[in-house]
Amino acid sequence: MKVMLRKANGQYTIYVAKKDLETPVVSSEKPAMWGGKITLENGWVLEMPDLPEDTRLPLTVEARKVEG
């Protein structure tokens, strides 16, 4: 699914347009969010694409829903 990742006030959030959902990221496997799984406040677990750590945000990417 396509999601937009952004960072505001030190907090990462994910926006899913098809679900009209914006929710904070509560945990991630990797500090830069890329190439691992992230857990959202609503319980979803998404697998993020592998991108360089210095990728500029906000950015829309294709993420895979694993759980939730």
Image (cartoon, rainbow, N blue to C red):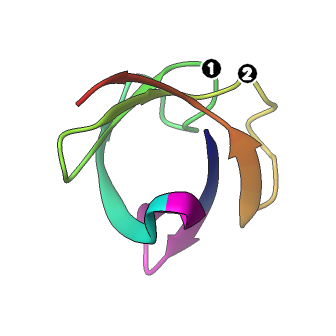
The residue under label 1 is 35
- Image-based side of 17 in relation to 11, left or right: right
Secondary element at tag 2: loop
N-terminal label among 1 and 2: 1
The type of residue carrying mark 1 is Gly
- To which quarter of the image does residue 34 belong? top right
**Measuring 75% from the left and 55% from the top, which residue is drawn there?**
60
Magenta region's main secondary structure? strand
Q: Residues within 10 Å of mark 2 (few under 14, many from 20)?
A: few
Magenta span of residues: 6-18
The quarter of the picture where the N terminus appears is top right
- Image-based side of 23 in relation to 9, left or right: left
Secondary element at tag 1: loop
Residue 44, given in percent of the width and then of the height, sits at 28, 37
The residue under label 2 is 50
Looking at the rendered structure, the number of numbered marks drawn on it comes to: 2
Query: Which circle marks residue 18 in the picture?
Result: none
Spatial distance from mark 1 to mark 2, Cα to Cα?
4 Å
Label 2 near label 1: C-beta < 8 Å?
yes
The type of residue carrying mark 2 is Asp
**Measuring 76% from the left and 58% from the top, which residue is drawn there?**
59
